[in-house]
């Protein structure tokens, strides 16, 4: 699903809120509407392999994902620096749409749980990690309450992702 009417940029994976599962129907206009009249994705994943720089992924692309009308509430980005003659490295980060006075605005904040942004390629992908991303479910459903018995956070275990990437290299 493209990010907007004038964009060909689209996430590698995305998820939307099933409004029928919310305990109280959200007010009309709570979720941005995407292609086909369906809710736009609230949670998106982008994986970049060798063709995008960290500044492109964490600045330009991030701005696109959180532009007006996209509906993105949370973004997860992975960057793989594939080097067939040396060490393959990687970076992972996540960001959420910023809020002001209880309303979403068209900017994002990169989370402190993200790997640091450095000038040289990041971590060796062969080294295990204990990094975990916590995605607040309430941010994805705001202003509606999450369904009963839902966890407070969706947990993304980066070690599990690292192992999948290593297996696919």
Image: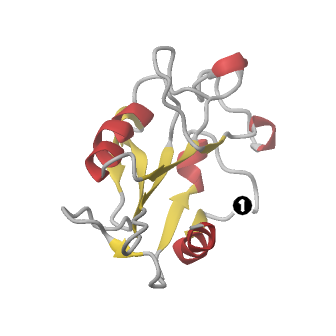
Q: Position of residue 154 (x, y in %)?
A: 61, 62
SS class of the residue under badge 1? Answer: loop
Q: From this viewpoint, is residue 101 visible?
A: no
The percent coordinates of residue 165 (x first, y second) are: 57, 68
Q: Residue furthest front?
A: 85
Question: Looking at this rendering, what residue extends furthest in the right direction?
Answer: 20
Position of the C terminus, as image quadrant, is bottom right
Residue at 67% in and 32% down: 26
Q: Count residues near mark 1 (Cα–Cα under 10 Å), then give few for <14, some for 14-19, many for 20+.
A: few
151 relative to 33, above or below:
below
Q: Is residue 2 left or right of residue 123?
A: right
Answer with the quarter of the image where residue 104 lies: top left
Which residue shows up at 46% across the image and 21% down it? 7
Residue 33: in sight, yes or no?
A: yes
> Which x, y percent locates residue 67?
39, 28
The single residue placed furthest to the left in the displayed view is: 119
Q: Nearer the viewer, residue 135 or 34?
A: 34
Nearest the viewer among 87 and 118 is 87
Up/down of 6 relative to 147, above or below: above
Q: Coloring scheme of the render?
A: secondary structure
Q: In the picture shown, does residue 23 fall above or below 155?
A: above
**What residue would you read off at disc 1?**
150
| The N terminus sits in image quarter | top right
Q: Residue 141, position in %: x, y?
A: 61, 43
In the visual, does 77 lie left or right of 42? left
Q: How many marks?
A: 1
Residue at image location 37% in from the left, 38% down from the top: 61
């Amino acid at each position: 699903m493209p990010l907007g009417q004038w964009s060909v940029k689209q996430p590698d994976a995305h998820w939307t809120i099933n409004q029928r599962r919310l305990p109280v129907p959200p007010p009309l206009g709570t979720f941005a509407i995407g292609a086909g009249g369906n809710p736009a994705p609230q949670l998106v994943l982008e994986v970049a392999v060798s063709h995008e720089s960290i500044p492109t992924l964490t600045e330009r692309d991030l701005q696109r994902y959180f532009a007006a009308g996209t509906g993105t509430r949370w973004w997860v980005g992975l960057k793989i620096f594939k080097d067939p003659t040396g060490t393959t490295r990687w970076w992972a980060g996540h960001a959420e749409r910023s809020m002001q006075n209880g309303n979403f605005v068209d900017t994002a904040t990169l989370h402190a749980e993200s790997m640091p942004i450095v000038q040289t390629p990041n971590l060796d992908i062969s080294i295990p990690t204990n990094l975990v991303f916590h995605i607040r479910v309430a941010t994805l459903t705001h202003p509606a309450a999450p369904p009963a018995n839902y966890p407070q956070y969706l947990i993304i275990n980066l070690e599990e992702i690292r192992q999948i990437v290593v297996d696919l290299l």
